[in-house]
Image: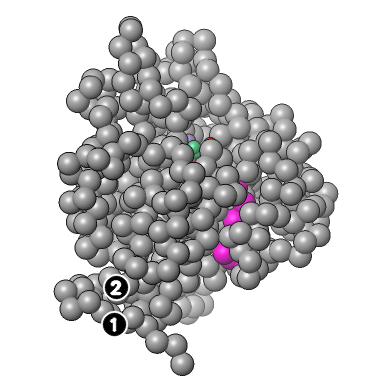
Amino acid sequence: MTTTPEPRSDAPLTAPGEILHVGAADYPGLDEWRSLPLSQQPDWRGHEDFDSAYAELSAHPPLVFAGEVDKLKRRLAKVANGEAFLLQGGDCAETFDGVTADRISAKIKTILQMAVVLTYGASLPVVKMGRMAGQYAKPRSSDVETRDGVTLPTFRGEIVNGFEFTEESRVPDPKRMVAAYHKSAATLNLVRAFTEGGFADLRAVQQWNKGFMQNPAHARYEQLAGEIDRAVRFMEACGADFEGLKRTEFYAAHEALLLDYERALTRIDSRTGKPYVTSGHFVWIGERTRELEGAHMDYLSRVQNPVGVKLGPSTTPETVLQIIEKLDPEREPGRLTFIVRMGASNVREKLPALVTAVRDSGAKVVWVTDPMHGNTITADNGYKTRRFDDILDEVRGFFEVHRSLGTYPGGLHVEMTGDDVAECLGGSDVVDESAFDQRYESLVDPRLNHKQSLELAFLVAESLTQVR
Ligand code: PEP
Ligand code: MN
């Protein structure tokens, strides 16, 4: 019989039987990361508000529950097995101002539309996940930024400091972790309402396109939505039960970069006595913080959530096998996802050795393509951008590699928005550099707009059909 820790008398029971705010304070090993190399963090431990912010977060209810996290792991096990597909999408960096009903609903709608294209196109269940409700911390290539002779701390995402280039805004402020928690709670609340309260009802599939200008991607979606609508009506006429179409599961994911935030939101599940990161269902380790002996690897090796690791072009097969050993020693299906971001010019050459090593080791991981982060360029007018053609090319390369090795290309990870921004170049409704001054909004990396996102979903649906 296993025993679970007794709740502290002042511990709020936020979800009885699911997860309790207990024990994480002294759970063995959970603070090991503090003695390991830890990169990409603000220097704020001595800040006068650090302790109170950390204590406040530690006392707040979890944003997600252990039971949901376990369910997601079961879904991802299906993906690892080739029986479902994973779609991850959202901003590079969420912003506090971006937490509005319009923006959140446009993003969810776009992800749901992409999922419909994939589900219908490839006849596969799609696990839907937003880079949402916690995607506030960013790794940066430099600790400082200099403009006109003035040097200030670099912008690390709104959970750490402000984007505005002033001393006041750039000094890291631990209270922002608490603000990010509340923004995430508000986001998740709307996500849950939308996806469980009828908005995601597949019978409304045609309405999700309303309000968008006509263009080839929308026309194609419109046609597909019409086919689904007819199929649904036919089934309805036959007396079929559509309870299952009314709501959908939608999971929250972000990069587990800021370990003070993740640690403060770690809770012990009362059912199993094990620690879960409760800031989101799925968390990943970025390309810049995935050192095997580093703090991030250690921390995520100790929690139960499904975790992802980004793999850039310099990754070796040995490293990949060591990551599996570290994060998934039990070879638990659904636990580990590799998010490949090699760049269109590298993926065909460099991915096969990694996939072969993993396949031959017998480990079952989820393979996801992130066709964004290896294809970033600077436009002539200074904007950070990506060519839509490079993005498509990396996705094609990813599918080709898996097809030739007989392995399963399990998912797509994109930076996108539901709004009509101009941040990535190209697409069937061409975005060019001259549009950046008017419609470039991202604070960090360029995102696909609504049309480009749909267009990509159609390409992936086709590629997936061929693989299967
Ligand atoms: C990101 O996903 O925004 C990111 C920084 O990615 P990577 O770690 O792959 O560079
Ligand atoms: Mn990014």
Given contact means CB atoms under 8 Å apart, are the residues at marks 1 and 2 in contact? Answer: yes
Query: Measuring 74% from the left and 56% from the top, which residue is drawn there?
Result: 358
Residue 183 vs residue 6, the one in the foreground = 6
Residue tagged 2: 22
Side of 3 relative to 49 (left or right): right
Residue 327 vs residue 279, the one in the foreground = 327
Side of 9 relative to 136 (left or right): left
Query: Measuring 43% from the left and 73% from the top, which residue is drawn there?
Result: 274
Q: Is residue 254 visible?
A: no
Residue at disc 2, CB closer than 8 Å to ligand 1: no
Q: Secondary structure at mark 2?
A: loop
- Is residue 336 a member of the stretch shown in magenta? yes
Residue 281 vs residue 395, the one in the foreground = 281
Indicate the amino acid at tag 1: Glu
Measure how far apart labels 1 and 2 are at the Cα level.
Answer: 8 Å
Query: Measuring 37% from the left and 83% from the top, which residue is drawn there?
Result: 4
Q: Position of residue 257 (x, y in %)?
A: 43, 45
Q: Which label number is shown at residue 74? A: none
Query: Measuring 56% from the left and 21% from the top, which residue is drawn there?
Result: 377
Q: Residue furthest bottom?
A: 1
Mark 2 packing: few (<14 Cα in 10 Å), some, or many (20+)?
A: many
Q: Residue furthest top?
A: 148
Indicate the amino acid at tag 2: Val
Residue 7 vs residue 306, the one in the foreground = 7
Q: Which label number is shown at residue 6? A: 1
Q: Which residues are magenta?
A: 333-339
